[in-house]
Image: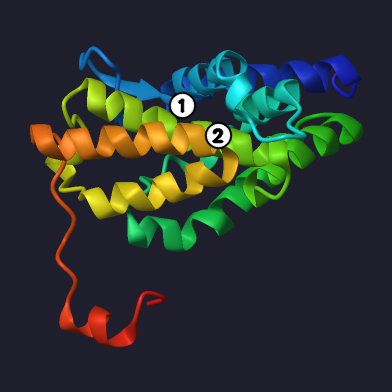
Amino acid sequence: MTDSRLTRQIAFVVELDKLKTVLRQTLLADSSRRETDAEHSWHVATMALVLAEYAPPGTDIARAACMLLLHDVVEIDAGDTFIHDAAGNATKAAREQAAADRLFGLLPADQGAELRALWEEFEDADSASARYAHALDRLQPILNNFATQGGTWRPLGVRADQVLGLVGRIARGSPELAAYARGLVEEAVRRGYLAAAAPPTSMSLKDGPDR
């Protein structure tokens, strides 16, 4: 039984349980505690179904939901990297590729390749389905941070310009959801949940908008 297809599938399923222990920075909407990767993955996959009418043309909603269920699996090994952590993000790709090698390698070869392809499609964000999935992955923390009155933003000193940079990524997958997120950011600044954008420096003005 040790080399059977079912045994390898069950080993992967059991390994997935570890995703329930990986904590993200984002708080639950009731501010009671930080959410786990497993909770986040379920949440955004469900959002893919509920918000389907705002997906770009050509989106396969079921495929987007599958991507979202799998997109953070690699964090079992790589850990959660905060979106505004420059040092952590510098090594993120390498850590997650190594994690993908191990985790999807637990499965039978054909199934491991199929699920890894979904994960890589999400990472590349080139297809309509992946762009929609990315939009939801970026939107959900904004929703929770607004609900918790800046639960992650305020203690970590996040600014409006940083969050608006993420809204730009949402726009690639859904202009309507990006517009909604932009409105939340503006309201969060007005209410004091989020620090205003940093003023431009003389260097940034000199070098232009592409710096």
Is residue 129 left or right of 24 when viewed as pictured?
A: right
Which residue type carries mark 1? Asp
- Report the front residue among 21 and 62: 62
Question: Is residue 177 shown above or below 157?
Answer: above
Q: Callout 1: 10 Å neighbours few (<14), some, many (20+)?
A: many
Q: Position of residue 75 (x, y in %)?
A: 51, 37
Which residue type carries mark 2? Asp
Please give the name of the residue rendered at 69% of the width and 24% of the height, measured from the top-left corner.
66
Q: Which residue is mark 1?
A: 37
Question: Is residue 13 shown above or below 103?
Answer: above
Question: Is residue 72 shown above or below 19?
Answer: below
Please identify the residue farthest to the bottom as the structure is shown: 206
The disc at residue 173 is none
The kind of secondary structure element at disc 1 is helix
Please give the name of the residue rendered at 35% of the width and 22% of the height, measured from the top-left corner.
35
- Report the front residue among 203 and 88: 203
